[in-house]
Image (cartoon, rainbow, N blue to C red):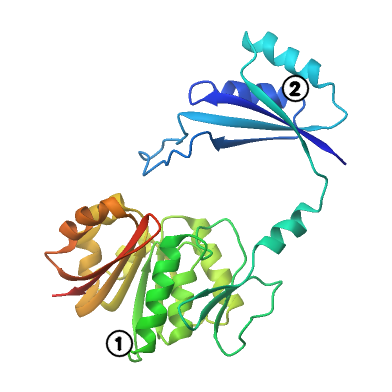
Amino acid sequence: MAWLQLTLEATHSNSNQLSDLLSEAGAASVTLQDAHDDPIFEPPPGSTPLWKELLLTGLFDADVDINSVLKFIETQYGHLPSYTLNPLEDKDWIRAWMDDFKPMQFGQRVWICPSWHSPPDPNAVNIMLDPGLAFGTGTHPTTSLCLKWLDQTFKEPLFKPPVDVIDYGCGSGILGIAASLLGATQIFAVDLDPQALLATQANAEKNNVSNCINTFSVPEFKQQFPTLQCPLLLANILAGPLVELAEMLASHVAPKGNIVLSGILAEQADKISTAYQQWFTIDEIIQEGDWIRVVGTKL
C-alpha cells in the first residue's frame, strides 16, 4: 500500500486544532516534530511541552483526493497553512527499524545488543536490550557517558565486590544491569514512572540478573531505605531534579563513595558542581556532544 504525507507548518497555539483537522480529513496517523531543532528542557510538572514552531504530518492513502483534503482544512481553519506533499515509499517499516538498531559498544567490554542480533563478542559484557517505552537504550550521549564510566571503573577495578549500587531514575534499567554484569552485588533501581520499573524488571530477567536488581518507586525507596548508603550512586536524569535532590542523593552515598551524574547539558556544569561540592570532591566533568557526565567522591 502506498502513502502520501501532507505536512503542515504549525505553532504551539494551533497545533491541536490542525492535528484534529488532519485526523478528521482521514489521516491514518498524525505526527508532530520540531520545525527548527529547538530543544525543550525540563517543563513544569503537569505541562505538555511543545516546540514554538512545529511540522504536523498526516499520513494518507495515496489514492485519497488530496485537493478535497486541502479544501476541507482551508474551510474549517479559515485559511490553508503552508504545506508540503511527499509520497512515502511502501516498505516493511518494522524490518527497517530493526535493521537500524544494531549492537553498540561502550568502552572496551560493554555492548548493548537487541534480541534479534547475536552479540559481536560473546565474551564481552553483553546487555540484551530492545527499544521500548522507558528511556535508555544506550543511543543517547547521557547513557553512553555512564556506561563508559562503568566499564572503565569496574575494570580497574575501583570497586571490589561486594558492591551495592543505587540507580536513581533507572529508566529501562540499563545502568543497573550493566553494573550488575560488571560485578556489582545488589542494585537498588528507583524511578517515579511505573513503566520504567516494569521495563527494568523485564530487562533484568532477560539478562539473568533479576536476583540482584530490586525496583522501587520513589516513595517506596524513601520509606524502606531512609538511611541507606552505597559506595556508588548513579543518577542519569536532568539538571533541575539533580539540583533539587542534591542533599538527598548525597545522603545515600557512603564516605569515599562515588556519585555519577548525567542528563546534564554542558552549560549546566557549573550549576551541578556548585550544588554538590559541599558533599563531594568533583573529580571529572566529561563531555560527549552537548551533554556531560559529572563524577564526584564523597568527602
Closer-to-camera residue (208/95) = 95
Identity of the residue drawn at 50% across and 58% down:
135
Query: Mark 1–mark 2 contact, CB under 8 Å?
Result: no
**Residue behind mark 2:** 25
Closer-to-camera residue (67/206) = 67
Give amino acid for label 2.
Ala
Q: Is residue 128 left or right of residue 65?
A: left
Q: Quadrant of the C terminus?
A: bottom left
Secondary structure of the residue carrying tag 2 is loop
**Residue behind mark 1:** 158
Q: Is residue 156 left or right of residue 246?
A: right
Quadrant for residue 131, please give it.
bottom right
How far across and down, in percent of the image, does residue 9 sit?
58, 25
How far across and down, in percent of the image, does residue 188 sit?
39, 73
Q: Is residue 80 left or right of residue 10?
A: right
Q: Vertical placement of 270 versus 90: above or below?
A: below
